[in-house]
Amino acid sequence: QVQLVESGGGLVQPGGSLRLSCVASGNIFSISDMTWYRQTPGKERESVARISSGGTANYADSVKGRFTISRDNAKNTVYLQMDSLKPEDTAVYYCNLRAPYVDYWGKGTLVTVSS
């Protein structure tokens, strides 16, 4: 069983930055693809950024050039650096770990972008 714990959310002004972290338990992190999702009330959960086990990153068009995903396999941690934040980035952000035959989710961390 893998547990994912997100942190780093909070209130930030438009144009500001936040860095989210997600720490995974267990020993499969290095072979797993990691994805950050976000969800707002009444909307479907959407993929924001993904990093493969090999380090290849992909981003949603809405965050390209503003968000950066990275991973530290030695710390079992994936990060999401969010810059130039906009009010429409307000959401609960979830960490997802996917490996052969397994799919785990964290409980989320709230990001609010408001003046």
Image (cartoon, helix red, strand yellow):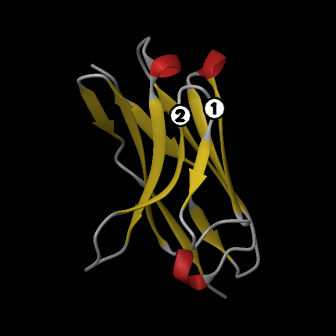
Question: Which numbered tag is attached to residue 55?
Answer: 1
- Left or right: residue 44 versus residue 30 is left
Q: Residue at x 53, y 64 (%)?
A: 60
Q: Is residue 31 above or below residue 113?
A: above
The quadrant holding residue 96 is top left
Q: Residue at x 57, y 70 (%)?
A: 61
Give the image location of residue 42, x and y in percent: 25, 80
Is disc 1 surrounded by few (<14), some (14 to 19) or many (20+) residues within 10 Å?
A: some
Closer to the camera in the image, 8 or 47: 47
Do tag 2 and tag 1 residues touch (Cβ < 8 Å)? yes
Task: Say left or right for 48 vs 80.
Answer: left
Give the position of the C terminus as an image quadrant.
bottom right
Residue 37: x %, y % from top left: 43, 56
* Disc 2: CA contacts within 10 A as few (<14), some (14-19) or many (>=20): some
Image quarter in which the N terminus is found? top left
Q: Does residue 52 lie above or below 92 as drawn?
A: above
Q: Alpha-carbon distance for marks 2 and 1? A: 5 Å
Q: In terms of secondary structure, where does tag 1 sit?
A: loop
Describe the element under mark 2 as helix, strand or loop.
loop
In the depicted structure, whether residue 88 falls above or below residue 46? below
Residue 44's x, y, as percent?
Answer: 28, 70
Q: In this figure, which residue is indicated by the disc labeled 2?
A: 52
